[in-house]
Image (cartoon, helix red, strand yellow):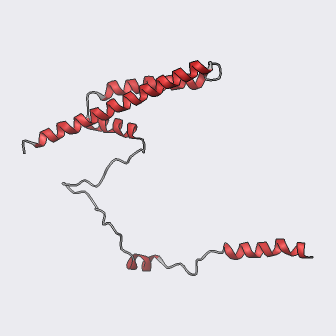
Amino acid sequence: MILKLIPIASLVFLAACSSSGAAHSPDNKSVSKNMTPSVKYASGRNSLTPVYTITSSNNSCVDNFNFLRRAGSEQYQKYSQDYIKIGNGYTFLNTNKNIMGDDAKAVYTMRLDMRLDTLCNRVNYAGYQVVKAKIKELYGI
C-alpha cells in the first residue's frame, strides 16, 4: 500500500515545486518604474562616440582578422590567403586522420598549430601597426 502512495506523493510534490509563479511576478510597468540600470547606454548615433560597434567572436585571432579587414590594411589579403591554406591543411588532416600513422598525424597537427599561432601573432601585430598609424595621424591635430 505504501509503495503505491510513493509515486502519487512524488507527483504531487513535483507539481507543487514546479508551479509557475505567475501570480507573484510583478508586471512590466512596475519593474521598469522601480529598477534603473546601473549603466546608462547611449541611444542613437553620436558623432563623437558611435553606438554601433562590431561584436566580438570570442576568438581573438578572428577578431584581429576582422579588425584588419575593416581598417583596410593591405596585409589582410596575404594573411587571409595564408589562413585559408592552414584551413585546407586542417581539412586534409581531418579527412585522412584515420589512415595516417600516429607519428605523422602528431607532427602534421603540431606544424599546423604552430603555423596558425604564428599567423595569428602576425595579424595581431599588423593590427597594432594600424592603430599606431592612426595615433600618428592624431599628432597633427
Residue closest to the far front: 103
Question: Relative to 20, is 75 above or below?
Answer: above
**Residue sitting at 18 percent across and 54 percent down?**
48
Q: Is residue 55 above or below residue 3?
A: above
**Image location (x, y in percent) of residue 2:** 89, 76
- Locate the C terminus by quadrant: top left
- Seen at 28% across and 27% down, the residue is 75
Give coordinates of residue 50: x percent, y percent.
25, 53
- Decide if residue 41 is in sight here: yes
Determine the residue positioned at 38% across, 46% down: 56
Q: Residue at x 34, y 47 (%)?
A: 54
Name the image quarter holding residue 38. bottom left
Q: Can you give x and y, in whole percent of width and height, for residue 134 in the image?
A: 18, 39
Q: Is residue 88 visible?
A: no
Q: Quadrant of the N terminus?
A: bottom right
Q: Residue furthest right?
A: 1
Q: Is residue 114 left or right of residue 124?
A: right
